[in-house]
Amino acid sequence: MNQINTDVAVIGAGTAGLAAYRAAKAAGKRTLLIEGGPYGTTCARVGCMPSKLLIAAAEAAHALRHSAPFGVRIAGEVVIDGIAVMERVKRERDRFVRFVLRSVEGIPAEDKLTGHARFIDRTTLQVGGQTVVQASRVVIATGSSPAVPTAFLELGDRLVVNDDVFAWETLPGRVAVFGPGVIGLELGQALARLGVTVRVFGVGGGVGPLSDPAIRDHARALFQQEFHLDPSAEVQHVARDGNEAVIRYVQRDGQVVTERFDYVLAATGRKPNVAGLGLEQTGIALDGRGVPVFDRETLQCGNAPIFIAGDANNILPLLHEAADEGKTAGNNAASYPVVSPGLRRAPLAVVFSDPQIAMVGKRFAELAPDSFVIGKVDFEDQGRASVMLKNRGLMHVYADRASGAFLGAEWIGPSAEHIAHTLAWACQMQLTVTQMLEMPFYHPVIEEGLRTALRDAAGQLAQ
Ligand SMILES: Cc1cc2nc3c(=O)[nH]c(=O)nc-3n(C[C@H](O)[C@H](O)[C@H](O)COP(=O)(O)OP(=O)(O)OC[C@H]3O[C@@H](n4cnc5c(N)ncnc54)[C@H](O)[C@@H]3O)c2cc1C
Ligand SMILES: NC(=O)c1ccc[n+]([C@@H]2O[C@H](COP(=O)([O-])OP(=O)(O)OC[C@H]3O[C@@H](n4cnc5c(N)ncnc54)[C@H](O)[C@@H]3O)[C@@H](O)[C@H]2O)c1
């Protein structure tokens, strides 16, 4: 058995782990980065980047099919070459992965260890069968994995998760997507626009991450115009038959139908990778899901020399949060036992559907009833959005009734990814609605729709 002694051991070389490694190294500590799977990060290999590449192909197909209202018609038919679509997705994805691999190659060999890590005690890790790592502090940055309902397992290779989609050689004919959350909406709509017959089934009525019922209903109605989406589906039976999945479900009109699919895509949420880490050996408190109880600001687990960052802690499973949290965990692991709160930016989330969904600041569900006003804009009559035939969507901005402070927003609409940044900056600057309305708005831009919502909020605040 080899033994390695180090100041900081980082488990997981994803976005959070790489940031933690760099922070601890920059603080002058001996740091060991342990990776049990492929290098390259979830984001680049099977997450953010390949999903956006698939969406880009879908947007191209959609734009071609919907150009006629502008007087621009396609004389022939629009052909979607599934093999070419998937080739580009994988080729470009591999390029993004190579950037990450190059940065990992730049890490000195003595700072890297491959193998699955498991705690023997608070500061001792078993890595693979051959190595024991003695570390003064440990950062857990093990990411998350798809949480697949066990009932689907009998589907065998007809059951797929996001990782499998990005390995396809070509596009399949029919896919049943379970879970109209972020992944289900992004991939489901993209596949539908690429000519795949898609059915999206949910439980409990949720659509994406939306918590504002009015926005959720609006989003549901918009998506239902384009593809089969039932957020409260009654699925009676799922089974494998030959090379297909057979699903019996109740349609929204009450009719029971049985359909056959090439694949069932489970997009039913993700679970933190904590099973098999041996956390019970550390004596730290674990929550009901087996995730260490930790401080959201310092990321420290109890008073142990253990920190947890990124999807592994399951609070904000987003790329930029994983990077920020990794830095915080790495800094605090280096300075332990002195720890301090890390940077927490204004909450910001975007779903790359069309129209896009975005959420900034406080969610509707987090706000105390009657403590806030809701400024609204329906994008149907918004000038620039109409020019571009992108005039679909509804926005709610929330403002504090007492102080007039901008609290947050939830919406579905055009250019949401960009407007979300403007709003997140305003939120972080703690601006009031009045101050936001003193800022410039060009003409004609979609941000004028945001101004309409802010004016609506300001009017209610003035009453
Ligand atoms: C389909 C999809 C699309 C997404 N799109 C977006 C998006 O558009 N924007 C956005 O902000 N976020 C997006 N996300 C979320 C984003 O990808 C994650 O929040 C982010 O990648 C998490 O980084 P991480 O470092 O926590 O985990 P990871 O990058 O998964 O890294 C964890 C690493 O730990 C390793 N590991 C696990 N256990 C052990 C162990 N015991 N020993 C050693 N190594 C171990 C794993 O092999 C892995 O390499 C998307 C996710 C998915 C799945
Ligand atoms: N654009 C982005 O930033 C982006 C894109 C993709 C993923 N992500 C991150 O990845 C995380 C995970 O995404 P996700 O879509 O897997 O999870 P999610 O939590 O967003 O959605 C899961 C959905 O599955 C539904 N569901 C659960 N069990 C079900 C069942 N048995 N049948 C049908 N539906 C079921 C839930 O009600 C929910 O609507 C997100 O929270 C997000 O942070 C971000």
Image: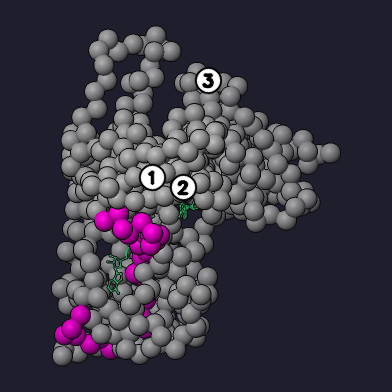
Q: Are marks 2 and 1 in contact (CB under 8 Å)?
A: yes
Residue type for callout 2: Val
Compared with 405, 103 (above or below) is below
The residue at 24%/53% (across/down) is 157
Residue type for callout 3: Ser
Q: How far apart are the alpha carbons under marks 3 and 1?
A: 39 Å
* Residue placed under numbered mark 1 in the picture: 247
Quadrant containing the C terminus is top right
Q: Nearer the viewer, residue 445 or 161?
A: 161
> Which mark lies nearer to you, 3 or 1?
1
Q: From the viewer's perspective, is 31 left or right of 356?
A: left
Q: Nearer the viewer, residue 190 or 179?
A: 179
* Residue placed under numbered mark 3 in the picture: 386
Q: From the viewer's perspective, is 453 left or right of 16?
A: right
Outermost right residue: 463
Residue type for callout 1: Ile
- x%, y% of residue 86? 21, 39
- x%, y% of residue 225? 49, 28
Q: Which residues are magenta?
A: 128-156
Query: In the rendered structure, does residue 132 fall within the stretch colored magenta?
Result: yes
Q: Nearer the viewer, residue 252 or 19?
A: 252
The residue carrying pointer 3 sits among few (fewer than 14), some (14 to 19) or many (20 or more) residues within 10 Å by Cα, namely: some
The residue carrying pointer 1 sits among few (fewer than 14), some (14 to 19) or many (20 or more) residues within 10 Å by Cα, namely: some
